[in-house]
């Protein structure tokens, strides 16, 4: 089986990463109750004998000794990484997997990309090589970062180019957290647009996510929980956000529910990789994702949705509720960015199902939903499906829908507008231009790269509703 | 003579397991509705074809190939259940990373890289046969490993074992909802197999899914259900039959006989299977069948191109002999009558000698350039198959697949015109010209079948 390495960059990336490792451990503990190190666990963890001095040779078989995350943690401040190292997950990381600085990137993409990029390139590369050496078949890098800040955005996208040069055959899947419109980082539009150019050019797949959508989903779950109507019958541990305990904590704290929000993203990554890790009657390996969902190299942004958000505690699933899971995956409210796939154009769509669901359930729902969705003319049957028999912890079944859909366009257009508002006034520009290697052309090239992308989506949108004609076929002599 | 089965990819391996299991269970079944002696002869013949023995345990004559380990591990553990049959100890080849639904990756990367190891596994299995009839290669055409590596290996088998026959059991994808690039992968596979295989035995997922729902009455259909129906159909073809009318010797070279009867011209290689009856065990207990009834239905399934016993169009009739073949060529016209090139009818069960096959001998069923006497063959055994007291199977080289093939080529062509996904293939050396070659070849095949 193949392995993946997670690269968590910046504050946001590390916080999500932290949730991810927590959930990944729980999931494998639930599935693998004998405590034997197997290939499924091996995809994200290596098994190390810590009694051996030095690097702690990886053990490929036998009992689980000490699991180490296949991860590299990068931040240009120390706060979050230190917190992780003092928290309950400290044992799955060691100091050889960390890169930190103390000065921070000051919410400046240029500092992350140019200053820290060149300063830490060799060190990062060395740790990446080390992580790669520990894998016997490295298939995928998962980069988790945010677009709005300095480190995640600048250094995170710097990494992409490094990975492309050094590991050209290994896939680069990027989970990017986009800033919401009332983001408190004033330079976030600059950072996001500069980062977008790198994503356009060097990522295989990008899963864009925005904070506002995550927040809305949490609010909806909280509403259900506190309305009391369903509250007692919601199965503990079955929330897509986290355990019920975290919910109670949230009720007391009244802070922005970042933990719960990060948990959604962590669940997304677990689900995305589940069919590659566990058995199923219709497997979907990670390399099938881009093969099926990316028809043209640049159009690699996939809108995701996870359902159900929680599971009710009764044992039997009536088909009606199973079908609801499929319907919800296409509704606006369940998307992890502000987007409405149902009213936009699909280039391709993947349905990844986990748990007790059969091929006939999948087919029934595709037939049912197809008439309400618009697909591009040359890909009318643009469905990719998978069935993984292991459900997420606490659920009997769940679904991840990935849509390559023109509904991402509004997010990009809005980002460009916010960028232009700042850029016209040249606001804060000097902070960037004083960084060595940054020129004004970086900004103009970045914005034209984004415009070209928007233009591609426009052209596809323009074909919506046009009469469909078959291309004249080849003629052969009989 | 023996057949070496090559199971490729997730689909090929899952089906392969069910096929061996069905063959084994049927041959073990004491309820053959025939004499003990005959049952033993049947068993021995089945064993010779598909199994060998190691320490008294039947070992499937199979090589398992996949580019990722999960599926093979799963079926090996299933086959390890005691008291049944097993796979050979060194019959598996798997790698760590699959082909990612990319035909080009399976064909151009995995193929050349692992050719030597896989071919040597196959050779070892061949050496264990007293005499080799040929290869049975089970693969899907939609994904990457079965389709791409399958096409590559079939070519290599053609080079290395030019005297052995190769039949590819191919699984035709659902019309929608499996793999997005399935139409590209399918046309690349089909065109390559057309050059290197002797016959393609086609099973459509959509058809089998419908059989599960309508005839087997399964509510929540799993891939296991689908594969079991498929295995039943294959068993009804490949289990032993008498070598000649009235003889009690079993046919020694089923693959060779089948090709000889059904593939008289290399332009026509696509074979379809129909069988009757097929039903859930519960219904079977309350049903009786006569040969007259079964054959009447089977014949109508053939000429009206019905894919199963339910929903047969009884209006379709052969046209009067030798009317000018007006409009025969046009695809746009609803094609009602299914013209055959050659058919094989296989009858198993009680009073099989009394079955009357006149209805299949009608020249109006066949193309004009082959003598009807050569176009129909019949295989029989009085040993019942899989608990059905009487059952019939039809393997047909006819216009069955004109429409599915035309659909797949059409969809692939529309996508090709937009150039979508092409970059994924050129990355591994499959260029636009390769696609065009495939399109040309398949358009030719469609036209030839239309012209029957």
Image (tube, helix red, strand yellow):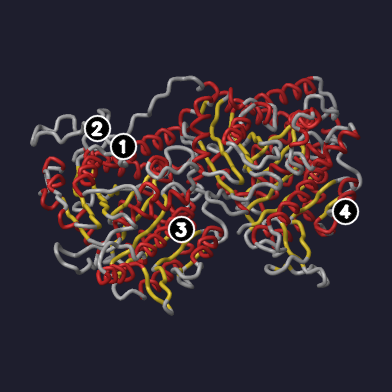
* Residue that carries the numbered disc 2 in the rendered image: B335
Q: Marks 3 and 4: which is nearer the front?
A: 3
- Residue B17 sits above or below residue A371 on the image: below
Q: Quadrant of the N terminus of chain B?
A: bottom left
- The numbered disc on residue B403 is 1
Contact between marks 3 and 4 (CB within 8 A): the answer is no
* Residue that carries the numbered disc 4 in the rendered image: A85
| Helix, strand or loop at mark 3 | helix
Front residue of this view, candidates A269 and B234:
B234
Q: Quadrant of residue A301?
A: top right
Q: Which chain is disc 3 placed on?
A: B
| Helix, strand or loop at mark 1 | helix
Residue at the (43%, 66%) spot, across then down: B63
Residues at marks 1 and 2, common chain?
Answer: yes
Contact between marks 1 and 2 (CB within 8 A): the answer is yes
- Residue B343 sits above or below residue A427 on the image: below
- Residue B215 sits above or below residue A165 on the image: above
Residue A470 place in picture, x, y as percent:
38, 28
Residue at the (28%, 59%) spot, across then down: B384
Contact between marks 4 and 1 (CB within 8 A): the answer is no
Residues at marks 1 and 3, common chain?
Answer: yes
**Of marks 2 and 3, which one's residue comes earlier in the chain?**
3
- The numbered disc on residue B13 is 3
Crowding around mark 3 (Cα neighbors within 10 Å: few <14, some 14 to 19, many 20+) is many
Q: Marks 1 and 3: which is nearer the front?
A: 3
Crowding around mark 1 (Cα neighbors within 10 Å: few <14, some 14 to 19, many 20+) is some
């Amino acid at each position: 089986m193949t392995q993946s390495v997670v690269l968590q960059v910046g504050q946001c990336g590390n916080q999500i990463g932290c949730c991810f490792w927590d959930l990944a451990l729980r999931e494998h503990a639930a599935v693998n109750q004998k405590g034997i190190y197997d290939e499924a666990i091996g995809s994200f963890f290596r098994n190390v004998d810590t009694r051996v001095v030095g690097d702690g040779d990886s053990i490929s078989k036998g009992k689980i000794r000490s699991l180490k995350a296949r991860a590299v943690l990068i931040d240009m401040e120390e706060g979050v990484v230190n917190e992780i190292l003092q928290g309950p997950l400290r044992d799955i990381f060691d100091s050889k997997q960390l890169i930190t600085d103390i000065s921070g990137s000051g919410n400046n993409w240029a500092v992350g990309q140019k200053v820290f990029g060149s300063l830490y390139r060799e060190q990062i590369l060395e740790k990446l090589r080390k992580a790669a050496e520990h894998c016997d078949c490295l298939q995928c890098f998962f980069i988790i970062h945010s677009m709005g800040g300095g480190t995640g955005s600048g250094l995170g996208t710097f990494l992409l180019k490094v990975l492309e040069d050094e590991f050209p055959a290994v896939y680069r899947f990027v989970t990017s957290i986009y800033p919401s419109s009332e983001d408190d980082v004033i330079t976030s539009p600059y950072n996001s647009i500069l980062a977008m150019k790198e994503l356009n050019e060097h990522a295989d797949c990008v899963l864009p996510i925005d904070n506002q959508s995550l927040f809305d989903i949490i609010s909806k779950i909280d509403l259900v929980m506190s309305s009391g109507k369903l509250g007692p019958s919601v199965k503990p541990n079955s929330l897509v956000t986290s355990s019920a305990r975290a919910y109670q904590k949230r009720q007391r704290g009244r802070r922005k529910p970042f933990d719960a929000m990060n948990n959604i993203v962590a669940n997304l990554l677990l689900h995305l990789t589940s069919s590659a890790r566990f058995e199923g009657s219709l497997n979907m390996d990670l390399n099938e994702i881009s093969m099926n969902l990316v028809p043209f190299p640049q159009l690699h942004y996939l809108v995701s949705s996870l359902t159900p958000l929680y599971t009710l505690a009764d044992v039997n699933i009536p088909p009606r509720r199973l079908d609801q899971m499929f319907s919800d995956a296409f509704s606006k409210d369940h998307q992890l960015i502000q987007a409405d796939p149902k009213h936009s154009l699909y280039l391709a769509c993947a349905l990844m199902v986990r748990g007790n669901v059969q091929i006939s359930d999948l087919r029934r729902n595709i037939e049912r939903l197809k008439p309400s969705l618009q697909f591009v003319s040359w890909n009318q049957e643009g469905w990719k499906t998978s069935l993984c028999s292991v459900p997420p912890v606490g659920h009997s079944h769940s679904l991840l829908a990935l849509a390559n859909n023109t509904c991402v366009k509004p997010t990009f257009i809005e980002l460009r507008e916010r960028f232009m508002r700042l850029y016209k006034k040249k606001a804060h520009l000097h902070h960037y231009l004083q960084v060595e290697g940054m020129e004004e052309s970086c900004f103009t090239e970045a914005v034209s790269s984004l415009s070209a992308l928007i233009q591609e989506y426009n052209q596809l949108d323009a074909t919506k509703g046009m009469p469909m004609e078959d291309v004249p076929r080849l003629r052969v002599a009989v | 003579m023996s057949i070496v089965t090559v199971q490729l990819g997730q689909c090929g391996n899952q089906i392969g397991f069910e096929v061996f299991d069905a063959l084994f269970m049927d041959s073990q079944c004491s309820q053959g509705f025939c004499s003990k002696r005959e049952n033993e002869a049947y068993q021995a013949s089945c064993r010779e074809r598909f199994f060998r023995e190691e320490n008294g345990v039947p070992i499937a004559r199979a090589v398992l190939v996949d580019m990722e380990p999960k599926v093979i591990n799963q079926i090996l553990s299933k086959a390890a259940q005691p008291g049944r049959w097993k796979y050979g100890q060194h019959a598996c080849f798997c790698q760590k990373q699959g082909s990612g639904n990319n035909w080009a990756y399976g064909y151009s990367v995995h193929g050349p890289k692992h050719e030597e190891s896989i071919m040597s596994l196959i050779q070892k299995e061949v050496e264990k046969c007293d005499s080799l009839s040929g290869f049975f290669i089970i693969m899907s055409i939609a994904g990457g490993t079965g389709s791409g590596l399958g096409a590559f290996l079939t070519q290599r088998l053609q080079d290395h074992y030019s005297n052995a026959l190769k039949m590819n059991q191919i699984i035709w994808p659902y019309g929608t909802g499996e793999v997005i690039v399935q139409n590209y992968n399918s046309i690349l596979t089909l065109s390559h197999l057309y050059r290197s295989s002797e016959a393609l035995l086609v099973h459509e997922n959509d058809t089998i899914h419908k059989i599960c729902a309508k005839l087997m009455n399964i509510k929540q259909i799993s891939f296991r259900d689908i594969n079991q129906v498929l295995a039943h159909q294959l068993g009804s073809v490949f289990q032993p039959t008498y070598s000649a009318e009235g003889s009690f010797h079993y046919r020694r070279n089923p693959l060779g006989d089948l090709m000889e009867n059904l593939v008289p011209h290399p332009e026509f290689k696509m074979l379809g299977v129909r069988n009757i009856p097929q039903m859930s065990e519960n219904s079977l207990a309350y049903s009786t069948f006569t040969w007259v009834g079964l054959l009447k239905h089977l014949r109508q399934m053939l000429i009206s191109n019905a894919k199963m016993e339910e929903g047969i169009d009884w209006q379709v009739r052969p046209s009067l002999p030798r009317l000018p073949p007006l409009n025969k060529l046009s695809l746009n016209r609803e094609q009602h009558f299914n013209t055959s090139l050659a058919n094989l009818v296989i009858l198993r069960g009680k009073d099989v000698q009394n079955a009357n096959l006149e209805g299949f001998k009608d020249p109006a069923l066949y193309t004009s350039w082959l003598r009807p006497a050569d176009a129909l063959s019949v295989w029989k055994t009085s040993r019942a198959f899989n608990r059905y007291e009487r059952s019939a199977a039809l393997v047909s080289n006819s216009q069955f697949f004109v429409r599915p093939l035309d659909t797949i080529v059409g969809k692939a062509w529309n996508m090709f015109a937009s150039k979508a996904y092409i970059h994924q293939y050129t990355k591994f050396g499959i260029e636009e010209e390769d696609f065009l070659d495939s399109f040309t070849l398949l358009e030719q095949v469609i036209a030839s079948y239309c012209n029957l």
